[in-house]
Amino acid sequence: MRRLSVALLLAAGCIHGAPRRDDRVIRSIAQQERWAQDAVAARPTRSQLDAIRSGDYQAVGRARAELKRLVQAIDRGTWIRNTTAELLADDQDPYFIAAFDRAGRVRSEAVQAADELAGALAETKGGLTIGDLKPAFEAIHKAQGSEDRIARLPPRAGGIRLALSPLPVPRPFIATAARLAARNPELARELDRLPPEDAALIRARLADVDRGREEQRRAEAPPAPAATPPVPAPEEAPPGAPGEPREAEAPSPTLTIANDAAALLAKRTPRSITLREDGLFELSYDDAEYLVDPNGKLVRKEAHQR
């Protein structure tokens, strides 16, 4: 009797053709796809992102709600790809193939939009926390796990494999979380609530942010003034017509510590330094008197008179 029942079922299948697709699954796929596309279509414009960065209260409030919708869109795209990949194992329906590929594209757009929006929220005070980013990191991990499983699926008829939809590189939301932790060190403690891999990437990026800030501070610091030699005053034009004899200039009353004078002073300190009437400077030592001109050049050495 059991064999007869199975035979009747098989015969019924031959008469009525292949089993019909489950319309409930198709409706669910279409609904999830529509919600994901709506979230991507409502992504903030450039002017709206600028308003968020400026701290506009209403713009920030709308952006936080939109970020949640975009993260949900990432999960919706992952669910569609997982579901259609399972259905395609038994049914090579073109609808499922097209839905599988569209889900990859809309998920990529949702990831890009969510990462950009999170970055804008991170630039305004109180716009975002590390906890707000946790669902986004979880969505990225689920998407990556899905792509890893799809890559291991056996090829379909004819050796055709399902097209992968790789996630962006570098990993989304890492730079945003690092900027948040850099601005508010207290938020760094929330990193432990994230998956260890993400927390490690954020801390590495945080070190780069700190190093970049230090280099920028050094670049913006005014350079130290360079020591410049004194510029000698220009000589005044001699009175009278060219070639007319002029009075000899008075000797300089200042001794320049250079040349021989510098060498003498480097060796030992004189008992006294005296400006003589002839314009020479007398460096008095125990053994002799050293006469130098105002430029520090030794003119002569005179022994003490006994």
Image: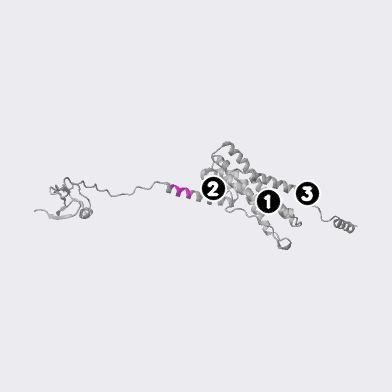
Label 1 SS: helix
Bounds of the magenta span?
212-217
Secondary structure state at the residue bearing disc 2: helix
Q: Are marks 3 and 1 in contact (CB under 8 Å)?
A: no
Label 1 crowd (10 A; few <14 / some 14-19 / many >=20): many
Indicate the position of residue 145 as horizontal and vertical percent values: 65, 54
Q: Residue at x 63, y 40 (%)?
A: 65
Q: Is residue 254 left or right of residue 26?
A: left
Check whether the beta carbons of the residues at disc 3 and disc 2 lie within 8 A of each other: no
Label 3 sits on residue? 23
**Could you tell me if residue 128 is visible in this image?**
no
Q: Nearer the viewer, residue 305 or 124?
A: 124
> Which residue matches tag 2?
178
How many labels were placed on the picture?
3
Q: CA distance from mark 2 to mark 1?
A: 29 Å
Dot 3: within a 10 Å radius of its alpha carbon, few (fewer than 14), some, or many (20 or more) residues? few
Amino acid carrying mark 3 in the image: Asp
Question: How far from the left and from the top, in percent, is residue 211?
Answer: 47, 50
> Label 1 amino acid?
Ala
x, y percentage for residue 115?
Answer: 59, 47
Residue 259 is covered by the magenta coloring = no
Disc ID at residue 103: 1
Residue most toward the right?
1
Answer with left or right where residue 181 lies relative to residue 219.
right
Ranked by sequence position, the earlier of labels 3 and 2 is 3
Residue 140 versus residue 117: which sits nearer the camera? Answer: 117
Mark identifier at residue 154: none
Q: Amino acid at mark 2?
A: Ala
Q: Earlier in the sequence, mark 2 or mark 1?
A: 1
Kindly report which numbered mark, 3 or 2, lies closer to the viewer in this rendering: 3
Residue 109 in the image, given as x and y percentages of width and height = 63, 49
